Structures are given as C-alpha cells and as structure tokens.
Amino acid sequence: MKKLLITASTFPRWENDTEPRFILDCAIELNKYFDVTVLVPAAPGSKKNEVLDGVNVVRYHYFPIHKLETLCYPGAIVPRIKEKKTRILLVPFLFASLFFKLLFTRKKYDLFISNWIIPQGIIHAFFSDKYIQVGLGGDVTSLNKGILKKLKKRCVEKASYITVVSKDLKDSLIGNYSLNENKIEVVPMGVNLAKFSPANRIENYFNQEDKKVILFVGRLVEKKGTEYLIKAMKDIPAKLIIVGDGPQRDYLVELANGIGSDIEFVGPKNKEELIKMYASCDVFCLPSVLAKDGDKDGTPVALIEAMASGAVPIGTNVGGVGEVINNKINGLIVKDRDENDLHLALDSLLKNDELRIKFSAQARKRAEEFDFIKIGERYKELLEEYC
C-alpha cells in the first residue's frame, strides 16, 4: 500500500476538539486506499504523534518555546495575526520548520496532498515531488501581491494538479495566475451523511420553548458577515444561536446587546455537539461577505453539514455559498451586507412551516452530492493519475 502524506494548517488538536475536522474526515476516507499520515503544526497541549480515527497524525514544532506556538490555532493563521499582531513574528519559523520537516521526512512517502497554498503549497514547491494542491478559500483569493504572489504562482505552476472547493475559487486562480483550466478541478470538501442527519433532531434542544431557532456556525471574522445577521435579528421573534469564536467576538457581543433580540453566543463546539445542533435548529444562516483583504468563503463545510441535517439555509452569493444553495429550491440567497434583505428572508421562512419543510427535504438531497465517500474516491483517482 502506497504511503500518502497530507499537509495542512487547520486540524483538530486532540480528540473531540472544536477545531474544524474536514481534513481529518477526508484523510479517513483516503485511509481506505493508502497508508495516510497527516502533517500539521503543533499547538500547546497537543501530542506530537497520535492516531485519530485510524489516521496517523504528526505535529511539528515551529518555535523553541512551545507554549508560544499560537499562530495556527484556534482559528486560522491570518485571523490569528489580526487578533495579535506580534504573531506575525512566528510566520518565518512556521515556514522554515515545515520546510525542514519535509526535507528530512518526505522520502518516506509516495504521494502528497497539500492543503492551503499558504504555507503548505509554497513549501511543497521547493521539492521535486509531485503533489496535488488544494485551494480552500482565502489562500486563493487574498495575499496576491508582491513576493507572496510570486511564491503562490510558483506553487500552482509546479503542482501536478490543483483542486479547489468552489467554481468561484477556480475562476480566481485562473484569473490571477493565468493557469490552464484543465489543470484545475472543483472538488468540494464533503460531509459524513451517516452522522449528519435530520434524525438527530432534539426538540427544545436550545431551551427555546415555542420560538424557532436560527443557527450560525463559523469563525467570528469579517468574511462570515455575522454582524449583518445580528442586525437582521431586530424584531425577529426567534432565537439566534451563534457558535464559534474569533477576533470579532467582543464587537459582535456588544452589537447584539444593543439589538434587544434573543441572541446567544455559545462558543466553539465539537462535531458531536454540532450533529445535534444542526438537526435541532430551523434555519441555518451564513451571510458571507468579501472581506477588505480579499478573503472570502470557499464552500463552507458547516453549510453542507447543516443542510445534510435538514436545516434550511440562508446565505449570500459570495464565494462558494451560492454554488450550494439553490435559491428558492433548497434555501434562500440574499444580498450580501444587506441586513434588511436578510431580515425579510428570515421573517418569511420562519412564518412559513410548509416552505421550510419543502426546503429542508431539498437541502438534504443537495447535501447528498457532497458525500465524503465520493470525495475520497475522486482524490484516489486524482492521486493515481497525476502522482
């Protein structure tokens, strides 16, 4: 069995962590076909080596004082730097540590998948190995100036093949780097349909009594557009549950306090908790926007998981969100940065039980197209063909 190395910078730090686990879920599927190891940055409290759900996980240290290895978790690199500017000093250490880790260990592996162009893809491009590069969002749409743009161009040109999680990201890569579109394919991240299901619904799970529940799940950063959801809640007789954390939390809590609606911030949740939350809400809302630095959503895994659980989605046509939600078929698309349009959409859905039931069934049907089993099979084919 060939050995596959998957590199990433967002990954669970330990069992039942609240960090996104879509890279782990993809690795689990690929572990059926290859001997998979995932290489990710270390974090305070994480193990250097462990096995998660049958997948070998190796974490590399990137700073001599391990308790200061806070660049990647929780959240993502760019928001972590925005939250605390001094973390930018850790960036060269991260790049150098990954370089040397690959330099001394890559000969053990036959195949490579690099998730995120920055930093993983940039570092992979320094070696002669064939690799599949995966673009997931802001790594494609932002930081496209100066030396970083040159390094990103080198990465995508050297990659044997490129996958991105949305057509929007494919268009962005072709536009910014003049790539042959035949070298790039849209392969979204997927969902475990056996675990995320409407059957997990628990009535009154949020102690909402007779209120309907609107759910948001994501990092509290600009591109998620959470502030517009909070503003849209004014005079909406429902309960809004906000799952996640990030640099905008304090601002958003203050904003919510001034709205006078039933809004609860519950912090990050792990997968087992989310399985129940998605199924027990009535509407899932993701009002994504284009951030000032060019960052935007790819195809958010939270959106697919919510739809697989029967939640009715409301989103914007930013990034890959509009590629998943078919307006007025399995959910609603609203104007981005427009709390009034979002308010009207929320109000109309919450008042129409028949429409929500119809959209819910169609949302589940749409999510079935993102089954991780199919995603794993496609990556197996790509690895065999291009690496």
Image (cartoon, rainbow, N blue to C red):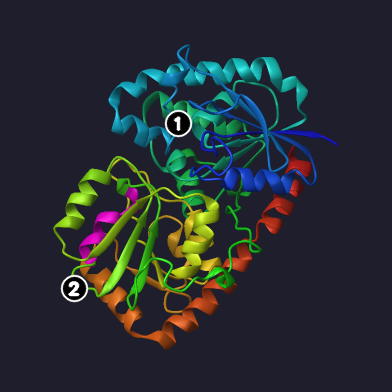
Question: Residue 93 location, x and y as percent?
Answer: 46, 16
Question: Residue 181 location, x and y as percent?
Answer: 58, 49
Q: Which of the two discs, 2 and 1, sits closer to the camera?
A: 2
Mark number, residue 301: none
Residue extending furthest toward the left = 258
Q: Is residue 121 magenta?
A: no
Residue extending furthest toward the bottom = 354
Picture layout, residue 90 above or below residue 173: above
Kind of residue at badge 2: Asp
Quarter of the image containing the N terminus?
Answer: top right
* Mark 2 burial class by Cα count in 10 Å: few <14, some 14-19, many 20+: few
Kind of residue at badge 1: Cys
Which residue shows up at 62% across the image and 61% down it? 195
Relative to the observer, which residue lies in front, 7 or 139?
Answer: 7
Relative to the observer, which residue lies in front, 88 or 49?
Answer: 49
Relative to the observer, which residue lies in front, 267 or 347?
Answer: 267
Say which residue label 1 marks. Answer: 72
Task: Give the magenta part as a residue range.
Answer: 223-232
Question: Residue 364 location, x and y as percent?
Answer: 56, 72
Say which residue label 2 marks. Answer: 235
* Mark 1 burial class by Cα count in 10 Å: few <14, some 14-19, many 20+: many
In space, the residues marked 2 and 1 are separated at their CA atoms by 38 Å
Name the element at disc 1.
Answer: loop
**Observer able to see residue 5:** yes
Label 2 vs 1, first from the N-terminus:
1
